[in-house]
Amino acid sequence: MIQLYLAPMHEINCLSFRLLCKKYEADVLYTPMINVKAYLNNPENFKWLGKEKPLVVQLIGSDSSDFKECVKLIKNCDYIDLNAGCPSTDNIKNGSGAALIKNLDNFKEIIKTMAKYSNIPVSVKIRLGWRKDESLKIARIAEECGAERLAVHARLFGSNYSIPANWDAIKKIKSAIKIPVIANGDIDSFDKVKECQKITNADGLMIGREAMRNPFVFKDIKNGFKNKEIINHSKEDRIKLILEFIRLYKKNEIYSNAELKNHCIWLSNGFNGAAAMRNNLGKCKDEKEIISIIKEIKK
Ligand SMILES: Cc1cc2nc3c(=O)[nH]c(=O)nc-3n(C[C@H](O)[C@H](O)[C@H](O)COP(=O)(O)O)c2cc1C
């Protein structure tokens, strides 16, 4: 069965969320992007457990010497990944994220440095190109410079989510390089998995936004492969899932009301009354209020 990857998601993939996705059968988990300079300033702030393995730690930055120091320090994960796809203005301004696929010299330099100094295999996550599709060239460079796996978010730097992911581009990459290729973009169900796999022949499939609102998606896809019925999750199932997340959050994270509230809001969908519940959660001032709203809707 093809491996399912939880996509890296900034402000989403805390340890608790990764553990939740693992429980619901995601095969490989990414951290959110971690700025190399922030990591080097205080590595203690970026602890992760080994429980949620296989784990990919994703780094973002633009200075190869930062990557050199970072990869020497990072332990307890299965891959260290370079973010070469983030389109946020701040990252682009400092030459990091998707700016790396515009400036391919620095892209090469960073991957070579990571591969040289890391004891852990290096992977890269790219978009298809800056203004036009140059994904084949970018993928070949990543492989030649030492990446051992490539995840492809099948959109250009400037394409937003309203533009469909271009899975045909992933197909071309897959047939041109030898390292495993992970397809990403718009995969949200067993049907999409089958379609994407058929088009791309990818070695793994990566899910972002659907996992953020519905961590059951991994298990549903696995059930599809096992010819089991894909069930419609009841309101009770979804509420139970939110309460499960809250328990994990309290155990593993430094409490932030805004963070917990946001997770509960993202997980509140797919049942009658979800929109009203999201609205009420938005107003909560503390954990007690959050739980009482969730328990209220459960009745
Ligand atoms: C809230 C959010 C945060 C994201 N943060 C990251 C990130 O930290 N690193 C990264 O490489 N991509 C990031 N992405 C992009 C996703 O990993 C993924 O490539 C993209 O959402 C397409 O997959 P999807 O259609 O399954 O959502 C983020 C996406 C979202 C929605």
Image (tube, rainbow, N blue to C red):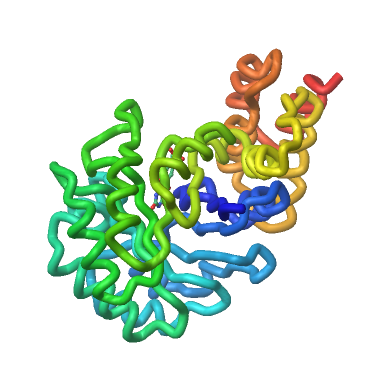
Q: Quadrant of residue 266?
A: top right
The residue at 25%/35% (across/down) is: 159
Q: Position of residue 272 (x, y in %)?
A: 70, 14
Residue 215 seen from this side: no
The residue under the point 42% across, 46% down is 184
Counting every numbered tag in the picture gives 0
Examine the image and state in which quarter residue 253 appears.
bottom right
Height in image: 245 above or below 295?
A: below
- Pick the front one: 217 or 88: 217
Q: Nearer the viewer, residue 285 or 55?
A: 55
Residue 26 horizontal side relative to residue 139, left or right: right
State the residue in front, 256 or 160. 160
Q: Residue at the spot x=30%, y=29% of the render?
A: 163
Image quarter for ligand 1 equals top left
Q: Residue at x 66, y 43 (%)?
A: 225
Asked if residue 158 is positioned above or below residue 149 in the image, the reply reads: above
Left or right: where 194 falls relative to 109: right
Where residue 219 appears, x then y in whole percent?
69, 43
Horizontal and vertical percent position of residue 74: 48, 78
Q: Quadrant of residue 241?
A: top right
From the image, which quarter does the C terminus lie in? Answer: top right
Q: Position of residue 66 (x, y in %)?
A: 30, 76
- Does residue 115 appear in this view? yes
Q: Is residue 29 above or below residue 200?
A: below
